Amino acid sequence: MPIEKGGGGPQRGDAWTVASGQAARWIGVELDVRAPRTWFGPSWAMLGGVLSSGGLAFDPRSLVLLALAWLVSEPLLGSLAALSMEMARLRREATLPPLPAGQWRLPYVQPGSPGGRLLGALAAQAARLQWNWRAMAGAAPRWALLALITLVLGAAAGAWTAAVAILAVLALLWVAASRPLQRAEREVVAAAHLLAAWLLGHGAFAAVDYRTLLVGLGFAAIWYAWTRRPPLLRLLVVVHVLLAGLLAALHAPLAAGGVLLLAVPLVVLLPANASSQRSYLQHTQAFLMASLFLAAWGLVWPL
């Protein structure tokens, strides 16, 4: 796949994070050899969600649903996340002069009256929206097109995927309309992306229940703790213990024990300093993904 430098990805002024890195893969890559890297976390989470549904069959319909869930969960939501953060940055750095509010008038509405004040507020809001549109330098139409494609494909995959896609798009719209996110906040976006991918995979084949939601939330929290610099050890341990307890309560003791066992490398291999964070993520992600698959298996075939 061709890689564009710069493009719509995060700029050098912002430190590289897992959120910006995994998202910008699809619309532009900012290379930084010192930065931590992960490999396709949302795709693995989507596959885990599919496994947790127990509804995957090797027929044309299942393959189409699988393809739709992957398109929405990794490239489309990833691109929207990167573009949303880029739009917030563009608005912050814009040097355009403010636009004056137009004079809106209606028959029989006097200046200074409640109706006149309402028209003035609407005109001022319209001027702000027009300024934001200009400041984002063409990013807004691209965002709208990506959002539309995401919602259409999500709806094509089923009611549950449509609901998850709508919530994800609304959350990313808030990201685009708010101030630029700090590093920890971008990692929250990455964790939420992982959760959305898990729910999209499950929702394409079965209804989302409380068990699926709780396990997805658990792995989103683990992803957040694992990708922080430095990793959040206490949160990592506590969430693994809670996940194992949940799986045991759901009569999946082998899956619970496996989740705890696979957590050991994540704890033992904790990076000694920031410079070893890259290798830590690369060397331990396989254990985390295996843990996710084992938990998904336990939800369907408890042992």
Image (cartoon, rainbow, N blue to C red):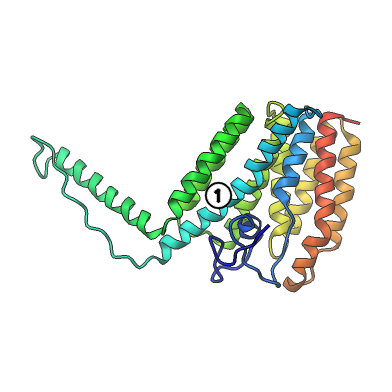
The residue located at (59%, 67%) in the rendering is: 5
Q: Please give the residue where the numbered disc 1 appears in the rendered image.
A: 80
Which quadrant of the rendered structure holds the C terminus? top right
**SS at badge 1:** helix
> Is residue 95 depicted above or below 87 in this figure?
below
The residue located at (12%, 40%) in the rendering is: 113
As drawn, is 28 to the left or to the right of 35? left
Q: Residues within 10 Å of mark 1 (few under 14, many from 20)?
A: many
The residue located at (50%, 39%) in the rendering is: 148
Which quadrant of the rendered structure holds the N terminus? bottom right
Residue 218 image-quadrant placement: top right
Q: Considering depth in this image, is 289 or 232 the residue closer to the camera?
A: 289
> Is residue 262 depicted above or below 217 in this figure?
below
Q: Could you say where residue 158 lies in the image, as x and y percent from the top left?
A: 63, 27
Q: Could you say where residue 67 lies in the image, as x and y percent from the top left?
A: 70, 38
As drawn, is 294 to the left or to the right of 207? right
- How many numbered marks, from 0 up? 1
Q: Considering depth in this image, is 153 or 237 the residue closer to the camera?
A: 153
Return the residue found at the far front.
2
> Is residue 172 depicted above or below 233 in this figure?
above
The residue located at (35%, 68%) in the rendering is: 95
Q: Could you say where residue 196 lies in the image, as x and y percent from the top left?
A: 64, 41
Residue 133 image-quadrant placement: bottom left
Q: Could you say where residue 180 lies in the image, as x and y percent from the top left?
A: 49, 60
Q: Considering depth in this image, is 192 or 127 the residue closer to the camera?
A: 127
- Indicate the amino acid at tag 1: Leu
